[in-house]
Image: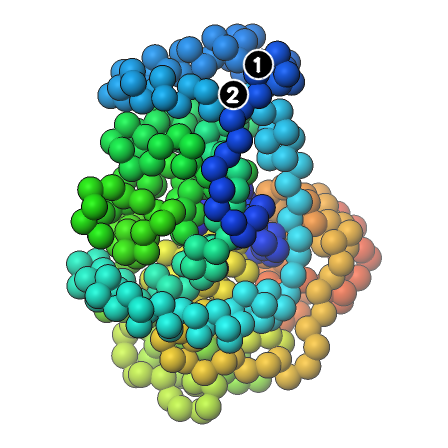
Amino acid sequence: MPRSCLPRTAIAVLAALAFSCVASAQFAPPPRPAPASQRPAPSLRAASCHNGASFERFLGELKQRAMAEGVSHDAIAEASPYLIYEQGIVNRDRGQRVFGQLFTEFAGRMAAPYRMQQGQQHIKTYAAAFARAQKEYGVPPAVIAAFWGLESDFGANMGNLPVLPSLVSLAYDCRRSERFQNETIAALKVIDRGDLAPDEMVGSWAGELGQTQFLPTHYVTYAVDYDGDGRRNLLRSAPDVIGSTANYIANGLKWRRGEPWLEEIRLPPNFPYEQADLAIQEPRAKWITLGVTYPDGRPLPNDNMPSSVLLPMGRMGPAFLAYANFAAYTEWNNSLIYSTTAGYLATRIAGAPPMRRPAGPVTQLPFNEIKELQQMLARAGFDVGKIDGVLGQQSRTAVKAMQIKYGLPADSWPTAELLARMRGTPRAQPAAAALPVVR
């Protein structure tokens, strides 16, 4: 999905189930909104970023802005019963928890054989639409099918909440107001052009719609009519879902036609782990000189194709070559766990064997110790982003720098040894500036 249930900022340990934010496996129309007298009033905190304006005044101004952007009066009138404030949505947005998982655990569940088989079957069932999408947009069927499967189990789990109240409530809240004002107006444009009626706009609590969970801005920009019925229906039309998802991947995420995205590899014991970083790109020929092979020992192609070594669980876990197209996955959802799982599932649907199991158990620090480590890294001068017990990319970059400082294998994976070293170290000024801060 073009995510909003997770803020699209780097999170290296994914929110389990954040990929769909699903509340139900059934598609059902939303209930009619409650009368205004029965709805909780918007919080004062929500109004503070709108110069104290009431929700009603804010909504009136938002409607005027929508009309200035071309939305018809009729579409706004049709949607108005659903443009209501729901404090529960705001509370849910502010109370999101991210649950750390090992990549192999998450991928084992989300890229399970049944989902691979379903993806392959859907490619056969909708062969014409997939072939058309690949010809027009250059996106392989397996890539589309993997996102389709992860986001909604091919339409089985799209969410069952009315989207318009979520969007306008988050627009009035101060945390991401401008973003969700844009999303609300985009949803009105979807209604105005006849793709969906307001009571059909059912999806996740955070406002995503359809079988690949598009935000309304992406729906407006990238949805295409592939079944020829004159509507872009990403809830019920599989051809529309396939074509629209391909359009978004190709033009929104800048997919490179004919190039790979992810391949499992094997590293030698003496591999320089500090080179394992998505920010470091080298030709495959360079990785050959460092002893990198495919898992079965076959040599990599001896060419200049740029690629990065990706270790989602450090040196003890699986290893991958990530190519330029892997950026499309981190743009779709830049949780490293989700993006790697999505890329891996696509390779499985395309016929790749299952990844190798780690040679031994990979230990992950518990939540409170990762948070303690982040606090110490911040005191040492690193920008680790939010100190939340989640190993995001900024935290991984800081961990790598400290591993180099202490002479440990610099694989960006926090270990008890690194934590012990830092607990026994007075405040110092490590060479934080030597490594780029990844935001």
Circle 1 or circle 2, nearest the eye: 1
Report the side of 258 relative to 386 (left or right).
left
Q: Nearer the viewer, residue 344 or 310?
A: 344
Color theme of the render: rainbow
Per the image, label 2 sits on a secondary structure element best described as loop
Looking at the image, is 379 positioned above or below residue 402? above
Residue 100 placement (x, y as % from top left)? 66, 56
Per the image, label 1 sits on a secondary structure element best described as helix
Residue 123 placement (x, y as % from top left)? 32, 69
Asked if the residue under mark 2 is in contact with the one under mark 1, i.e. CB atoms within 8 Å, the reply is yes
Amino acid carrying label 2: it is Ile
Q: In which quarter of the image is residue 415?
A: bottom right
Q: Nearer the viewer, residue 295 or 344?
A: 344
Q: Name the residue under label 1.
A: 36
Report the side of 217 relative to 376 (left or right).
left
Name the residue rendered at 64%, 65% in the picture. 102
Does residue 249 appear in the picture of this structure? Answer: no
Q: Name the residue under label 2.
A: 84
Name the residue rendered at 33%, 80% in the picture. 285
Q: Residues within 10 Å of mark 1 (few under 14, many from 20)?
A: few
Q: How many numbered markers are drawn? A: 2
Report the side of 290 relative to 227 (left or right).
right
Looking at the image, is 242 positioned above or below residue 34? below
Name the residue rendered at 34%, 61% in the picture. 144
